[in-house]
Amino acid sequence: MHSQNLFLKTPPLKLFFLASIPGAISMLASALYQTIDGVFVGRFLGGTAFAALNLAMPFVIINFALADLIGVGSAVPISICLGRKQDTEANNIFTCACLMIVGAGVLVGGILYVAAPVLIRLMGAEGEFAELAVQYLRVYAICSPVTTIVFAMDNFLRICGMIRGSMFLNILMSVLSAVLEFLFLVIFRWGIWAAALATCSGMFICAFLALIPFFRGNTQLHFCKPRFHCRMVRQIVACGSPNFLNNIAGRITSILMNVILVRLGGEMAVSVYGILMYADGFIQPLLYGMCDSLQPAVGYNWGAGKISRVRAIEKCCFTASGIVSILAVFVILLFPAEITNLFMANTSEEFMNIAVGALRLFGLTYVTRWFSFATQSYMLAIEKPLPASIISVSTALLLPVLLIALLWPLGLTGIWLNFAGTAFLAAILSIMILFKCRNELLRPDTYRDDM
């Protein structure tokens, strides 16, 4: 469907279902694969490999952070430009963003490959534990130039109204990665590096397929002769900063958590933390899929001046995010042992007790986490990167570090409580930001039919 008809004329509730359900399915497919990745590594390669994967994962996500900054940061101004009928500028931003992502993949991938052993040792890992983490990280670093663009293409396809195509590519990527990982680990019996290779292979294939319609000229966006200018780059960086800062700040927090956990409980504590992150990696993509899939529609209507329509779309987004989060709370609180057994079979009683207790405390996070998540997405979609960045950095770094200090006397229990405390404080911060921006968010429409 052409983006103007989809974003500007479709009733808000229908638009929500047309955009958010494929987006949620896409992210669910990705989350399922990430879960399968942890299950395969934990069950077929053992506890040390599972802990090594989780130790390396923050750096893997940092590897994609700069590309994500460019991809998300370009998607917002592209949507707004299309809403304002500035198609030439939208195509230029799209072309420049793709080139910037490839360049960033080369730069960051090279740095991480060289620095991997030092980074892992600095986290306190030694011996086989450290060696496996380095292997896993280096595969992602090598593949970075050809894989990092995949998530940006997801945004660009949705901007062009190819929502189902984006969904099917995400499903295909997850299926390919899972099949390849099963083949590499179970049939060929390769090591942890093959788990990373399976994921990167799936990403590369789907990134290539996603680029085909843009090269053929079958989309509203198309490649053109790139014209880089400072204003455009600043705009991309500003709009991409909330996600970038969230990725970087969140990984810094994860690294800090892992360093503390290695010292407080060794591999066992790191593995329990990994289970929490996999649970979060299943729920958060659903929230992200719903909110992120609506950003092109929100940005398009904001650029076109249909502010009342923006509010109607966001009302759907906030409501759905709250429902999904409350359901997640019940699932985690009711089935902590089953979630633990999914990743670590035949665990000791001590491990099970720690994991079950951690999951029950962690489950409280989603009572309030949805509100700050939806607010951050809202601010980003209407090109307000500063409040979105404040929520992002506070949620990912400032509040967790503050609570680490405040809850330190509780030991591991304080670490598990950190997530729920952070979500609660972030929700309060989000309410304050929405209240401060209320005049602009509630202003009347300025849309004209001749735009």
Image: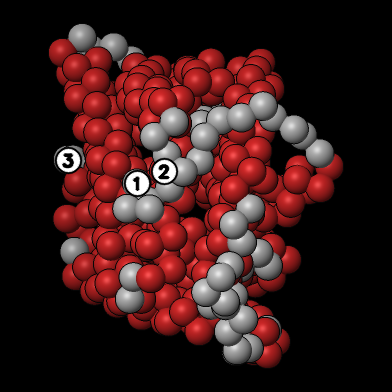
- Viewer-nearest residue: 376 or 153: 153
Q: CA distance from mark 1 to mark 3?
A: 45 Å
Q: Residues within 10 Å of mark 2 (few under 14, many from 20)?
A: many
- Callout 3: helix, strand or loop? loop
- Picture disc at residue 253: none
Label 3 belongs to which residue?
A: 346
Quarter location, residue 191: top left
Label 2 belongs to which residue?
A: 157
* Residue 137 x, y percent position in the rendering: 51, 24
Residue name at image x 19 percent, y 17 percent: 183
Q: CA distance from mark 2 to mark 1?
A: 5 Å
- Picture disc at residue 162: 1
Question: Which residue type does callout 1 highlight?
Answer: Met
Image quarter where the C terminus lies is bottom right
- Is there CB contact under 8 Å for labels 2 and 1? yes
- The disc, 3 or 2, on the residue closer to the chain's N-terminal end is 2
5 displayed left or right of 61: left
